[in-house]
Image (cartoon, rainbow, N blue to C red):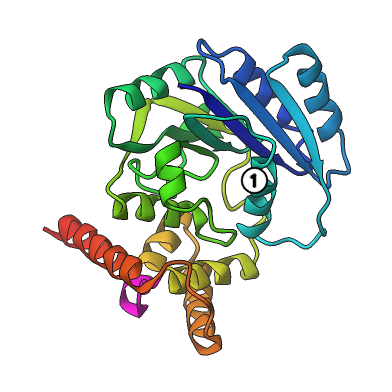
Amino acid sequence: MRISIIIPAHNEERHLKACLASFVTQTHSPGQLLVVDDNSTDATYNIASQFAQDFPWIRVVQRTSNNKHSPGKKVIDTFNYGLQFVDDYDLLGKFDADIILPPTYFEKVLAHFQSNWKLGMCSGLLYIQKGNDWSYENIADKNHIRGPIKLYLKACFDKIKGLRPATGWDTVDVLLAKYHGFETQTDPTLKVKHLRPTGHGYSTKNYKAKGVALYQMRYGIVLAKIALLKMAWQAKSPLLYIQGIFGFLRAWIQGKPPLVNKVEGAFIRQLRWKGVQKKLL
């Protein structure tokens, strides 16, 4: 199975070298790795270009965009820009530039896809450094495929019609994959080091965007409250819940366009309520 990876990168000189080094030392290398440099003002492009010189399956392209910070949208716009340069593939990956993969990452994930024809998405788990130890980044359940380490079966990626350029894209894709009958899987033996913890530098605007995303996924206010409470608890930030609710209500008043249609939304709500009931019983 041919594997193509896209890494959107903006001012990632601090982490990119270690990240790419973990790709080139894999026991099963991807067929193609594309680094999309989005308006970097540091050494990101030079670091990626050096790897591209040493490894012919690595390529670097540059994208010019505005400097406005837009959580979710900007990274997916950069990813989507890179799609035009990707060769034909069986598995497509969206990875971040601040992660370090274990050496057997693609070997093991590939085996999962080859052994289960219904598997649409697969990944390892993210760990963050706490002192001298690496601990699970506990902002999501261990069965959830996180945004920095996404790998899609081509048929699944096509069915969900790619990635939505908005906050919440990395939840929408999992839910839509299940809507279309695909399975998703995480491998707990694949511990990926996340060099920059999620939420680093989060602002009130980012928290509001969480609520907007839940509205656009057609959660409904009750499910949104439950989801935001869980996020706030995991992030240890009461502000996340308050600002998330504010974002949800403002999106409702403004009539923000949904990320999914009504049928998909109904499926998502049903799936989420089943999850809530399962945890309560």
Kind of residue indicated by mark 1: Phe
Q: Which residues are magenta?
A: 218-225
Quadrant containing the C terminus is bottom left
> Where residue 255 sits in the image (x, y, percent)?
52, 85
* Image point (41%, 67%), residue name: 228
Residue 66 occupies quadrant: bottom right
> Where residue 173 sits in the image (x, y, percent)?
44, 52
Under circle 1, the secondary element is: helix
Question: Could one spot residue 132 in this view of the protein?
Answer: no
Q: Main secondary structure of the magenta part?
A: helix
Front residue of 54 and 99: 54
* Image point (63%, 15%), residue name: 24
Residue 220 magenta: yes
Residue furthest to the bottom in view is 253
Q: Compared to 160, does 101 lie above or below?
A: above
Residue furthest to the left in view is 281
Q: Compared to 174, does 149 lie above or below?
A: above
Residue beneath disc 1: 79
